[in-house]
Amino acid sequence: MVFVNGRVITMDSDTPRAQALAISDGKIVALGSDEEILAYQGSSTRVVDLDDRTVLPGFVDAHNHVFNDASRYGGGMTFEQAQELALSGGTTTMADMFINEHYLEEMQSFAQDGSLRIRTSLYLTYTDNCGKLTGDWFLDHPPVLDSPEMLRIPGVKMFLDGGTCGRPALSVELPEGGMGDLFLSEAELAEALERVNEAGYQAAIHAIGDRAVETALNAIETATDASSKNFRPRIEHNIFVRPEHFARYGELGVIPVVVGNHKVCRFIDAGGVVDIGEFAHTWHRPLRSLVDANPGLPIAWHSDVPYFADNLVRPISDLAWMVTRRGFRPDGTVCEPPDWYLAHAVTAEEALQFMTSNSAYALFMEDMVGSLAPGKFADIVVLSQDPLNIEPNLLIETEVHATMVGGRFEYCLIGQEFCS
Ligand SMILES: [Zn+2]
């Protein structure tokens, strides 16, 4: 198949832009101008005219709960329906972050049936969301890091502070009193990191409050096993980060996995986080500061669907939020962000890196997904407009016209003929 007459954003610094691409056997063969790519045309080649649409690598959601919460939180959806929704948003790779023994079995049989159409990585529980240790069960399911597998097991997830259970661990008093719940001490976490890394798993540490972030960074630094530092440790959420910790991620090689959305209107209309205090102005979802303090560090995106998000799966709204920091009320009216909040915005280019190549790195999949280059999987999303060449407030209007995984159209917007 060849795609021509488009705007291809590769997220690969060697060839950032192309007009056309050729794919074969589920992989990208070449990128270039229309003329260069049409040279690959044979008698059985399907030629797709993009008609100036934009092609990006499919979105890589480094952390969500699309499958494991489908039935509980997604309105009683089946795995198949949840997957369909994720594909309609342009997600081609994702990681499901709360896998206990029960869900692992369900996911494995779903994949064995051939029903899994999104590349999925599973993170097995080390603790539950209340911080209770869930035992050694994960050791019976060895890591699977090979990129070509549709279902992989890269790591283990531990909750370090409150969120869905208990309160985030902060270093200041919460409005309701107390400083939140820290589930593991620095020494306990350091020991946990050594155990999981020794067994070959990556560690993904949930930390919402600044005291949890600090504990996670300290534990990674003090873990005596060198692999704890080299195994791409991830800190999930990073909602409150103290300025003295911004640069420590890069110094320690820790991947910040940042949330790409926020119920902006809820906190603007209700006072919300502003009431916690002035400190929140520099600490709260500090995407800009994390980028500036850590040149070259891959900061990864996660939707955390269905938590944090208003929609089930809509990467485009995450992209728009990261760039504009605006919110929308149910009636469509805009919630304009205060200046301190807008100061943490990133550029569309930076946000797209979070959502593709950086998230692929967070999953050990950068050799196959997250950018478009010869030899990588033909996992792409076709958009109605070019997010790098429009006014930021129009990003939210970008439509997903098609989603392709491994060279197959897995989603085609009704009315779009090029993919049907
Ligand atoms: Zn989560």
Image (tube, helix red, strand yellow):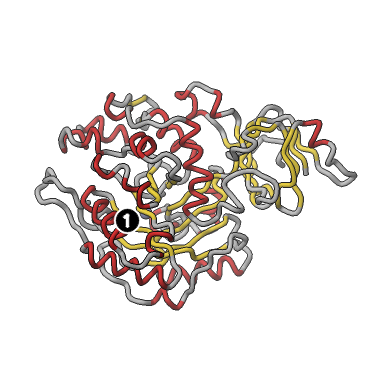
> Would residue 325 be seen by someone viewing this image from the given angle?
yes
Residue 137 versus residue 86: which sits nearer the camera? 137
> Would residue 328 be seen by someone viewing this image from the given angle?
no
Residue 387 versus residue 101: which sits nearer the camera? 387
Q: Quadrant of ligand 1?
A: bottom left
Q: Residue furthest top?
A: 391
Residue that mark 1 sits on: 206
Residue at screen point 36% across, 68% down: 225
Q: Is residue 26 left or right of residue 102?
A: right
Q: Quadrant of residue 101?
A: bottom left
Residue 278: give x, y in percent of width and height: 17, 32
Query: Is the CB of mark 1 within 8 Å of ligand 1?
Result: yes
Residue 185: give x, y in percent of width and height: 21, 63
Residue at screen point 13% across, 51% down: 179
Q: Quadrant of residue 384?
A: top right
Residue 41 versus residue 290: which sits nearer the camera? 290
Residue 123: give x, y in percent of width and height: 43, 63
Instruction: Check disc 1 and give the amino acid type.
Output: His
Q: Is residue 369 left or right of residue 363?
A: right
Q: Quadrant of the C terminus?
A: top right
Residue 60: give x, y in percent of width and height: 52, 48
Q: Is residue 148 above or below residue 420?
A: below
Residue at screen point 29% across, 44% down: 239
Q: Is residue 330 above or below residue 185?
A: above
Q: Secondary structure at mark 1?
A: strand
Q: Is residue 262 left or right of residue 418?
A: left
Q: Residue furthest right?
A: 43
Q: Quadrant of the N terminus?
A: top right
Residue at screen point 83% across, 41% down: 40
